[in-house]
Image (cartoon, grey):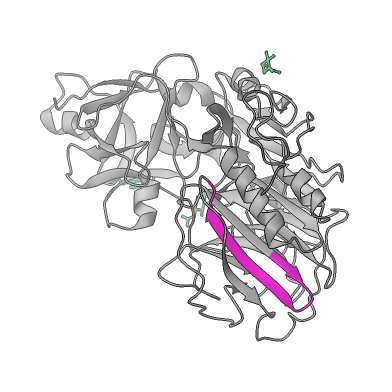
Amino acid sequence: MFPWVIALGLGSLVAAGPCDIYASGNTPCVAAHSTTRALYDAFTGALYQVKRGSDSTTTTIAPLSAGGVANASTQDLFCKGTTCLITIIYDQSGTGNHLTQAPPGGFKGPAAGGYDNLASATGAPVTLNGQKAYGVFVAPGTGYRNNAAKGIARGDAAEGMYAVLDGTHYNGACCFDYGNAETNGKDTGNGHMETIYFGNCNVWGTGAGKGPWIMADLENGLFSGVNTKNNAGDPTLNYRFLTAIVKGQPNQWAIRGANAASGALSTYYNGKRPNANGYNPMSKEGAIILGIGGDNSHGAQGTFYEGVMTSGYPSDATEAAVQADIVAAKYATASLTSGAGLAVGASISLRAATGRYLARDSSNITAEAVTSSSDASLRRSASWIVRTGLGNGACFSFESSDAPSSYMRHMNSTLLLESDDGSKDFAEDATFCPELGFNGQGHSIRSWNHPTRYIRHYSQVAYIASNGGVNTFDDAVDFHENVIWEIVEGFAG
Ligand SMILES: *[C@@H]1O[C@H](CO)[C@@H](O)[C@H](O)[C@H]1NC(C)=O
Ligand SMILES: *[C@@H]1O[C@H](CO)[C@@H](O)[C@H](O)[C@H]1NC(C)=O
Ligand SMILES: *[C@@H]1O[C@H](CO)[C@@H](O)[C@H](O)[C@H]1NC(C)=O
């Protein structure tokens, strides 16, 4: 049926990459972004660039072979013992539509100069056909953009796009988008965007169930179909690996999706432009965004592995072949932790290089001097029970031995002890992924939902800190030392 999709034993994943397939369908890629693999069979160039925290130098990651999976070893060796951020996601299409740190727009970002944050290079490990690779983990505040993109649809011109996402990583804030947006970073009116959106934001459109849904961000609205509000044909989707498609041409557009690990695409909407002013004809501007709204709204979260934008409206048959190619890439989960494992149920204490231990002081968490002869309440306050991660079962949560059902969680980057309120936000803020310590010993403990941030003591107070970020507690001086924790048997036994 699709003779160009042939699994090969070695070398490239398939005989044609997604962009070769789109080109065969006369709807060529004009932007092709992936940190995990080449999207053309012949592509051997740079997939993405990372910058490391230790000396601010950069390196690029290329496929292992033409058309193949990213060489994660390049990143692993370069980033060993320090932090790394994804600085550039290269465009493989030859159009030069690279994505870089999003500048301030209608909203300022949280990083220096009002830019959005860059993603951690290690927040979204996966395997493709058994080979390790890294996706782009977008925490709230993170965004990439190209306001000077070339060749992307403008006005009412036809385009298509797909993205492979993590269907379990989302939120209800605006807006985890990938696609066509305003060139000035501001809301310039209805119909000035056309992107894939994924999440459970219910301010504008919704689909069936509670979400998350694939919708289209067309500016001043997330749309799930022809109605501006609910369209029951757009299902809640939570495939771990999700293929999401949005495409548009004069007075027609579609939402499609699938499990990226198996099976075929379904069409969730295919019809006229929404029943509201300004969407027919469209006024697309042709910039590209990832992880943010067109006006630089940056409250959303999600994970991006690969995606493309095409010139022209791809046929369903072309998209079926692209979906088959994605399935053949065999996306699978990889370990989120490294270093010595933690046993769920164990009682632990966390010792800093200073010899102090992480302890709760009422609802604060601080670094305290504790010994085996300290009084029982101080010893309990410095003891934690390892639990399966409340927000992600591949990581961990730390329940206080001193206050059952209360966990370490971060809030506004400060570590606090709070009682579990059962919310998704609490669960995610209370989930941590220990890695081998930056000094090769002990652990450095990454926040699951803000993977650029690690548990750090600073002036004896505990934070989740990024390396050289805008807060005083992000100070790059002593960062690596202050995020090393020796995990020892809990004082409370
Ligand atoms: C992958 O990267 C490592 C580290 O940079 C390098 O030694 C190796 O040759 C690369 N592999 C391929 C196939 O290019
Ligand atoms: C907790 O920390 C805050 C901010 O540093 C401080 O104002 C407050 O007094 C602390 N509470 C306790 C019980 O130490
Ligand atoms: C969050 O922390 C930053 C830096 O410490 C501070 O400027 C800001 O006011 C805090 N925001 C809230 C809501 O506490």
What secondary structure prevails in the magenta region?
Answer: strand
Q: Is residue 372 visible?
A: yes
Residue 399: image location, x then y, percent: 24, 40
Residue 225: quadrant of the picture: bottom right
Residue 316 or residue 92, whichever sits in front: 316
Residue 27 or residue 487, whichever sits in front: 27
Residue 248: image location, x then y, percent: 73, 69
Residue 489: image location, x then y, percent: 22, 21
Determine whether, in the image, residue 415 is placed left or right of residue 405: right
Which residue does the image show at 64% across and 42% down from the upper left?
118
Which residue does the image show at 49% across and 52% down from the upper left?
167
Looking at this view, name the residue that lies furthest to the front: 1
Looking at this view, name the residue that lies furthest to the top: 440
Q: Is residue 142 visible?
A: no
Q: Which residues are magenta?
A: 247-260
Residue 189 or residue 283, whichever sits in front: 283
Residue 392: quadrant of the picture: top left
Q: Is residue 26 above or below residue 276?
A: above
Determine whether, in the image, residue 169 is placed left or right of residue 150: left
Which residue does the image show at 55% across and 54% down from the upper left?
264
Determine whether, in the image, residue 437 is placed left or right of residue 265: left
Q: Is residue 223 above or below residue 328?
A: below
Q: Is residue 476 above or below residue 236?
A: above
Residue 448: image location, x then y, percent: 44, 40
Residue 13 or residue 141, whichever sits in front: 13
Q: Quadrant of the C terminus?
A: top left
Q: Is residue 253 magenta?
A: yes
Q: Is residue 79 magenta?
A: no
- Give the number of callouts: 0
Which residue does the image show at 74% across and 60% down from the upper left?
160
